[in-house]
Structures are given as C-alpha cells and as structure tokens.
Image: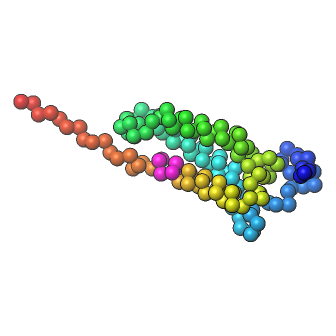
Amino acid sequence: MRLSRPISMDGTGEDGPDPTPAGEVSDGKQVEPVSQLFLGCLDRYHDLYLVLGEESCRVVKLNQVSLKKTGDEYSRLQLWGIQNMAALPAQVRGSLDDTLRHDETLRTNVTEMFQQLKDQLDRGMEPDFAPPLPPVQLLARS
C-alpha cells in the first residue's frame, strides 16, 4: 500500500516539492507536462469552435464540418479531462501527470496523442484549410 503525504494548496508535500520534478522523465529529458498539453488543446479547440461558428465560415457552409459534432467532441474532451484530472497542475497528487509519472510508455503515448491533436487543431485554424467557394456562375439571359 502506497502512503501519500499531505499536500498543500500549491501541490507540494509538507516536506517540500515532490522529488520527481514535474515534466521530467527518468532519463532526465525535459518534456512538457501533460496538463499543459491538455489545456493547450482545450484552448485551441475552443478557438476552432468559435471560428467555425462564425457566419462566414466556408467549411460549415459547404457541410464539410458539422458545428454540432465539433461541439460534441469538444465537450467529450472536457469531460475526459475532468474524469482523468488532466487539468490539474503536474505536481498535484492525483493529477494525470502524477498518475503517469511511473509509466513512461503510457505517458509518451498520451503526450504524443495530445501533440497530434494540437497539430490537427492548428491545421484546422489555417486560413487556407478549406477550399475556396466555387465562383458564382451567372446565368446568361436569353
């Protein structure tokens, strides 16, 4: 049975911070905490949702993207984050970072998943992502 030491409001134990620095893996290589990756993805997803909700959004007008489905997926990501405590700071006991601290393979997989999601969200925000609307053909009057 693993005993946990009491934590203060800043996520450190009574004896000071956890000996394993947040965001560091066993080989000493610094990586971005999962909580920061998750929050970055949430922010980017929110931005994308707002852009898609604009009246002039081409991809929605062309039915290439469903605003409702995008909102549903955004909500699912938020719920997943709450259930897995992904938004808690890395040094807080019980956070997703804390849970993954001793499983480097799973931590790597989760980190890569969030990086891929961020890349896809960034791509969706590019102005040239959607093809241009076809030109309006004027009917010749006879």
Occupied quadrant, residue 66? top left
| Residue placed furthest toward the front | 1
| Residue placed furthest toward the left | 142
The reply to whether residue 57 is in sight is no
Occupied quadrant, residue 74? top right
With 106 as the anchor, is 10 left or right in this view?
right
| Residue placed furthest toward the top | 142
The residue nearer to you, when weighing 111 against 35, is: 111
Q: Where is residue 77 in the image (x, y as percent from the top left)?
A: 61, 41
Q: Which residue is drawn at 76% across and 47% down?
A: 95
Q: Main secondary structure of the magenta part?
A: helix
Q: Position of residue 136 (x, y in %)?
A: 23, 37
With 118 as the anchor, is 96 left or right in this view?
right
The residue nearer to you, when weighing 8 against 6, is: 6
Which of the image's four quarters has the C terminus? Answer: top left
The colour scheme of the drawn protein is rainbow
The reply to whether residue 117 is in sight is yes
Q: Give the residues drawn in magenta, as a range.
A: 120-125
Q: Where is residue 29 in the image (x, y as percent from the top left)?
A: 71, 67
Residue 102 against residue 50 in the figure, above or below: below
| Residue placed furthest toward the right | 15
Residue 34 against residue 57 in the figure, above or below: below
Residue 138 against residue 34 in the figure, above or below: above
- Is 67 within the magenta? no
The residue nearer to you, when weighing 16 against 93, is: 93
Q: Residue at x 56, y 45 (%)?
A: 44
With 31 as the anchor, is 121 left or right in this view?
left
Q: Where is residue 117 in the image (x, y as percent from the top left)?
A: 56, 50
Q: Residue at x 76, y 66 (%)?
A: 26
Occupied quadrant, residue 139? top left
User: How many marks overall?
Assistant: 0
